[in-house]
Amino acid sequence: MPQAKGGTSQFTVRSNEINYRGEATMPAVVSYFQEAAWDNTKTLGISMYDLLERGLTWVLQRMRIEMFRYPKHDEKVTVETWASGREKVFLHRDFRLYSEAQELLGQATSVWLVMDVEARKMVAVPDFIMAHEIAPDHPPLPFAKGKLPALETPAYEEQMPVRWHDIDLNRHVTNTRYIAWVLEALPVAFHEEKQLQELDIIYRAESLLGDTVLSSGGKASAENTFLHKLTSQQTGKELVQAQTKWGASD
């Protein structure tokens, strides 16, 4: 049985990936994680393109991210990623983000499913993926499990129309766009005063071209913590549930 060895990918923080502080945004960081996952699965023969040839695709179900420092414009970073576990139809993958000096900038754990492209339904993990053993030389981060508190009374809301450039290879809204929309509901003054330290996001349903998404947010019971949800205004479905934790801006 082949081992699902981990991999590393290098990135340089580009000018279109930074905020007004000159730091990479959370969507940019998650895009590095996803690109590194793609690189690693390609070497294993189980990339999205490999799955698409069989009428299947990868779908991100959950990601929990901790950031210790955001890299700055033109900074070179390395993402280390590895398959970290399996539970029935859930496949776990972990990430660590390092600076050139090997400073740990952030880390994340994620949960993936396999979807039938035509039926748009989740399927059992096929044998050609199950044939790969979990990387034995990388201790897993704690799995992202359990429910998040529900957002009962939103304090902030924004409408987001789904446009052509929001759509990815799976012909639905890309994961990083959902993250941006979750954060967009909070006021500008809040973003200027605070910095996002942790994000736990659960992807519940897909949103397609022509939809309008309502982003809602409000304070949680824990200090410096907010609850979020994205809802399709066409179908009424909850698309995303998330929780964020914030610290003071440097």
Image: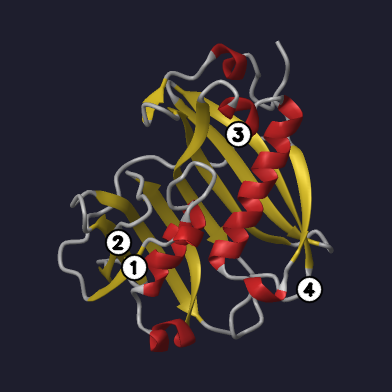
Tell me if mark 3 has few (under 14), some (14-19) or many (20+) residues whose alpha carbon lies within 10 angstroms of its own: some
Tell me if mark 1 has few (under 14), some (14-19) or many (20+) residues whose alpha carbon lies within 10 angstroms of its own: some
Q: Tell me which residue sits at (61%, 61%) in the image.
A: 29
Mark 1 belongs to which amino acid?
Met
How far across and how far down the image is residue 24, in percent? Answer: 63, 71
Considering every residue shown, the one lying at the far right of the view is: 101
Q: Quadrant of residue 161?
A: bottom left
- The residue indicated by pointer 1 is 160
How far across and how far down the image is residue 136, in percent? Answer: 70, 26
- The residue indicated by pointer 4 is 74
Mark 1: secondary structure: strand
- The residue indicated by pointer 3 is 48
| Alpha-carbon span between mark 1 and mark 2 | 5 Å
Mark 2 belongs to which amino acid?
Val
Mark 3 belongs to which amino acid?
Met
Q: Tell me which residue sits at (42%, 58%) in the image.
A: 178
From this view, report whether residue 241 is shown above or below residue 119: below
| Alpha-carbon span between mark 3 and mark 4 | 29 Å
Q: Quadrant of residue 209?
A: bottom left
Pick the residue in front: 186 or 120: 120
Sequence-earlier tag: 2 or 3: 3
| Alpha-carbon span between mark 3 and mark 1 | 27 Å
Q: Tell me which residue sits at (52%, 16%) in the image.
A: 126
- The residue indicated by pointer 2 is 213
Q: Is residue 207 left or right of residue 193?
A: left
| Alpha-carbon span between mark 2 and mark 3 | 26 Å
Sequence-earlier tag: 4 or 2: 4
Sequence-earlier tag: 1 or 2: 1
